[in-house]
Image: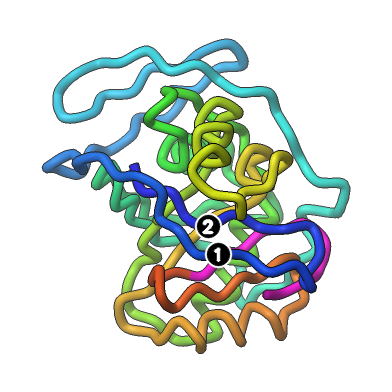
Amino acid sequence: MLLGDDERAAPAMGRRGFLGFAAAAVSAAVPVASGMVTSVAARVVTGGVVSGITAAPVLLGSGSAEAAPLAGGVRRLSLHNINTNERFDGVYWADGHYKPDALRKLDVLLRDHRAKQVCHYDPRLFDLLARVHQSVGSDDPFEVICGFRSRRTNAMARRRSRGVAKESYHTRGMAIDIRLPDTQLRAISETAKAMQGGGVGFYPRSGFVHLDVGPVRSW
């Protein structure tokens, strides 16, 4: 699994870029069935093998998830997890509500596949991603470098780099590290910073932008 750099609590604190460690990606994309995740556990089919996945606690931010304005009556996302080769391309919000099946699919796509844990993501992050994608005018899906990070995986990353926060927003289902093949990283970073939706970290050497829906800050 590729691990992106982690965020610091304050923008003034410097960080060193790292990708940590990697694992081989699954060779084929796998559609995730709706209703897969429960409050206790989930099962996902990956590369033809059914694996048990533990559901992490629900950890949502304190702000309103409905606050992010987007054009049109639907909100959609297109994501490609480069670690598992799984994809999501569809509507996650329509008719004034988030679509539970779509949110479950996104939670599974962004799971910590190393620890086999799924976290219920803060949907404000999906709104932020949709707004950024809409604003930069990309035709490509977001490539996901790192989504949810379990406590165990985060601790492993902390042992490898001093730049990893103990209380990472990745462990709370509130952060993601992404890139767009057809868009410069700086354009993604500057667009996200202008939206004031949370934290934005720019990592040109590692090849991604960190986004989270924690306090507004940038580095």
Would residue 74 be visible to someone looking at this image? no
In this picture the colour scheme is: rainbow
Position of residue 153 measured from the top left corner of the image (x, y, whole percent) = 50, 32
> At 71% from the left edge and 66% from the top edge, which residue is drawn?
199
Residue annotated with mark 1: 16
> At 47% from the left edge and 55% from the top edge, which residue is drawn?
4
The part of the image, by quadrant, that contains residue 178 is bottom left
Of the numbered discs in the image, which one, if any, rests on residue 65? none
> What is the three-letter code of the residue carrying label 2?
Asp
Position of residue 186 measured from the top left corner of the image (x, y, whole percent) = 50, 86
> From which residue to which does the magenta span run?
209-219
Q: Secondary structure at mark 1?
A: loop
Residue annotated with mark 2: 5
Position of residue 1 measured from the top left corner of the image (x, y, whole percent) = 34, 41
> At 70% from the left edge and 56% from the top edge, which residue is drawn?
124
For the residues bearing labels 2 and 1, Cβ distance under 8 angstroms: yes
The quarter of the picture where the C terminus appears is: bottom right
Please, is residue 209 above or below residue 52 in the view?
below
Specify whether 96 is left or right of 132. right
Position of residue 8 measured from the top left corner of the image (x, y, whole percent) = 72, 58
Please, is residue 201 above or below residue 153 in the view?
below
Mark 1 surroundings within 10 Å by alpha-carbon count, few (fewer than 14), some (14 through 19), many (20 or more): few
Q: Nearer the viewer, residue 73 or 18?
A: 18
Q: CA distance from mark 2 to mark 1?
A: 8 Å
Would residue 24 be visible to someone looking at this image? yes
